[in-house]
Image (cartoon, rainbow, N blue to C red):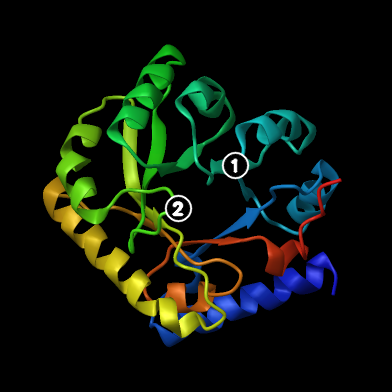
Amino acid sequence: MGLAENLNSIQERIRAAATRAGRDPASVMLLAVSKTHTPDTVAEAARLGLSVFGESKVQEAKAKIPLCPGKLRWHMIGHLQSNKCRDAVRLFQMIESVDSLALAEELNQRADQAARTLPILLEVNMVGEASKFGYKPAQLLEEFKAINELPRLEIHGLMTIPPWTPTPEKVRPVFAQLRTLKQECEQLLGAPLPHISMGMSGDFEVAIEEGATIVRIGTALFGERPKAR
């Protein structure tokens, strides 16, 4: 299938999952994961109505974003190194992968230099996978207030990448735990957090049923990523 057909299928599956959960489908943002795909592919997706795209590497985004339609919004969804924060603040409208107080402090400094406020999500490694970045839940709760006090950052919610499994139901407990952790953060904050970013091509329907407001979809939308040469 082509991009238009893939998008229609995904949108219908989002609508069905939201309906099953008693939610408004409009409460779920489809974040198109465009890493390794060309500016032409991004432009085609934009013509079909997509407006929010996710990249995993600052260097790739730095080369790609200037070649894409200008009204798009970009989220950083990959691990961010401190030495890339200046570019990240310039390129992205949201950083979904803040995983330490030190990184948050660097982003705050760079956002201050750029005279902007930066929306962020805090990335959580819910099951402690050694191969993945992200806060341990207890550490997140310990550092949450300190991050919230940084004047140039706005915490908009949490993000996670669950363990890979061919059976989406197996990660339902991980998504449910992130939702509970978000509620704990809201109690610390004394205000609601609008976003919970979880669910990808293989498990986004389960994520929506468990409360996802952002689903990060690449392969199901664009097809398999181009092989590196």
> Which label sits on residue 132?
2
Vertical arrangement, residue 195 with respect to residue 58, above or below: below
Q: Position of residue 74 (x, y in %)?
A: 59, 41
Give the amino acid type for the residue marked by disc 1 in the picture. Arg
Estimate the spatial distance between the alpha carbons at disc 1 and disc 2, rounded to whole Å: 25 Å
Mark 2 burial class by Cα count in 10 Å: few <14, some 14-19, many 20+: some
The answer to whether 50 appears left or right of 191 in the picture is right
Q: Position of residue 30 (x, y in %)?
A: 57, 61
Vertical arrangement, residue 12 with respect to residue 134, above or below: below
Residue located farthest toward the front when viewing the structure as drawn? 130
SS at circle 2 = loop
Residue located farthest toward the bottom when viewing the structure as drawn? 20
The answer to whether 2 appears left or right of 72 in the picture is right
Q: Nearer the viewer, residue 97 or 30?
A: 97
Give the amino acid type for the residue marked by disc 2 in the picture. Lys
Q: Residue at x 61, y 69 (%)?
A: 201
Quadrant where the C terminus sits is top right
Q: Nearer the viewer, residue 108 or 132?
A: 132
Mark 1 burial class by Cα count in 10 Å: few <14, some 14-19, many 20+: some
Q: Residue at x 65, y 42 (%)?
A: 72
Quadrant where the N terminus sits is bottom right
Label 2 near label 1: C-beta < 8 Å? Answer: no
Q: Position of residue 190 (x, y in %)?
A: 13, 49
Q: Quadrant of residue 152?
A: top left
Q: Quadrant of residue 227?
A: bottom right
> Which label sits on residue 73?
1
Q: Residue at x 45, y 25 (%)?
A: 82
Residue located farthest toward the top when viewing the structure as drawn? 113
